[in-house]
Image (cartoon, grey):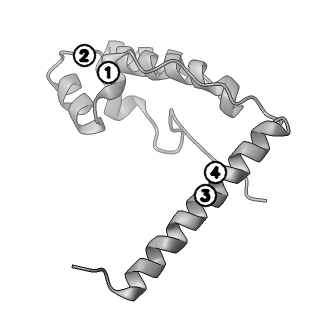
Amino acid sequence: MALPFTIRIQLLLLRAVGFLIGLIGQAARAFGGPKFSSGTTRPVTEPLLLLSGVQLAKLIRQRKVKCIDVVQAYINRIKDVNPMINGIVKYRVKLAGTADALGEWETALDPERPLCLTTQKRR
């Protein structure tokens, strides 16, 4: 069965756009590419980083994983990735360790002072 005319036109346009994007990518590589480092990071090897937040919370509640281990895994990953993204990072591991030792995550963390904060400056 033949495709309707409008769908064939859409497919043709998508192929043309894909071709043009490929040409732009080749031209960018030929002229030196981006001016920033475009290296890649190591793949994620820490199993804690592959779990969802819900799964991590469940493991922490069951005391199978310590909070400080989760925080340290994420901090190590941030240290891996940060040179490429050039983020401004303030490490507050001491607070996480104190809260983990006391077993008081709910009371140790002030909602006005989060452990992790990301912001983006719009231009």
* Residue found farthest to the front: 1
* Element assignment for label 1: helix
Side of 12 relative to 85 (left or right): left
Circle 4 residue: 22
Circle 2 residue: 65
Label 2 amino acid? Val
Circle 4 residues within 10 Å: few <14, some 14–19, many ≥20? few
Q: Residue at x 57, y 59 (%)?
A: 18
- Mark found first going from the N terminus, 2 or 1: 1
In the image, is residue 32 above or below residue 1? above
Q: Are dots 1 and 4 in contact, CB under 8 Å?
A: no
Label disc, if present, on residue 109 of the rendered structure: none
Circle 3 residue: 19
Label 3 amino acid? Phe
> Splitting the image into 4 quarters, where does residue 49 fall?
top left
* Element assignment for label 3: helix
> Splitting the image into 4 quarters, where does residue 62 fall?
top left
Circle 3 residues within 10 Å: few <14, some 14–19, many ≥20? few
Circle 1 residue: 48
Circle 2 residues within 10 Å: few <14, some 14–19, many ≥20? some
Side of 93 relative to 106 (left or right): right
Depth check: give the residue in front, 95 or 57: 57
Give the CA separation, mark 3 to mark 4. 5 Å
Q: Residue at x 58, y 66 (%)?
A: 16
> For the residues carrying marks 3 and 2, which lies nearer the camera in this image?
3
Side of 82 relative to 93 (left or right): right
Q: Are dots 4 and 2 in contact, CB under 8 Å?
A: no
Question: For the N terminus, which image quadrant?
Answer: bottom left
Q: Residue at x 40, y 29 (%)?
A: 108
Give the CA separation, mark 2 to mark 1. 9 Å
